[in-house]
Image (cartoon, grey):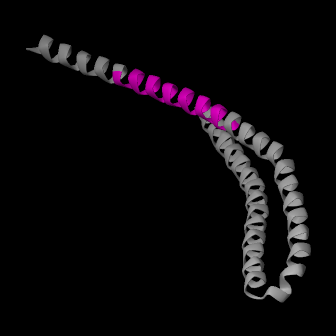
Amino acid sequence: MKTLETLVRLAKFNVDDKRRVLAEVMAQVDAVQARIDALARSVEHERQIAFDTPALGPTFGQFAAKAKADREAMEQQLAALQPYVDQAREQLAEAFEEQKKYEITKDRQDENERLELDRKDQAVLDEVGLQSHRQK
């Protein structure tokens, strides 16, 4: 009984650790995505300024080319992070599956112990009832 409780606790700790790892990788993905979104907003803002101020139009082309190169670099970062995300998700799923196996086994063992205790209690009650009946 105590061994299964320990295994369940260790499995929960392992799942929590895998969740933390996945959260860290996803935070990196979110940070890169936020930079991509900020760059897109910046490009749109600069486009509007270039549209409103025709003298700045020629410089917008250089800015847009640099922004495109930056976006491609950030998208490559996202692509490079994807295997880590996939691996972290897979490890989390495996850890969760292991935790569930231990929990199910522990639940079954607890149920079997409860049934055995109930059976023993019923046997005692039956014996008391038989003794009482014999005394009458």
In the picture, measured across the screen, residue 27 lies left or right of residue 133, that is right
Instruction: State the residue at coordinates (49%, 25%).
Output: 108
Of 106 and 98, nearer the camera is: 98
Instruction: State the residue at coordinates (69%, 49%).
Output: 19
Q: Please state the horizontal and vertical placement of residue 46, each as a whole percent of the image.
A: 78, 80
Of 68 and 13, nearer the camera is: 68
Number of callouts in the render?
0
Farthest residue toward the left?
Answer: 136
Q: Please state the horizontal and vertical placement of residue 43, each as a whole percent of the image.
A: 77, 73
Magenta stretch, main secondary structure, is: helix
Residue bounds of the magenta highlight: 95-118
In the picture, measured across the screen, residue 11 lies left or right of residue 124, that is right
Of 128 and 87, nearer the camera is: 87
Above or below, comparing residue 44 to residue 133 in the picture: below
Q: Please state the horizontal and vertical placement of residue 94, each as a whole percent of the image.
A: 70, 33
Q: Is residue 101 magenta?
A: yes
- Look at the image and tell me in which quarter the C terminus lies: top left
Q: Is residue 110 magenta?
A: yes
Above or below, comparing residue 42 to residue 119 in the picture: below
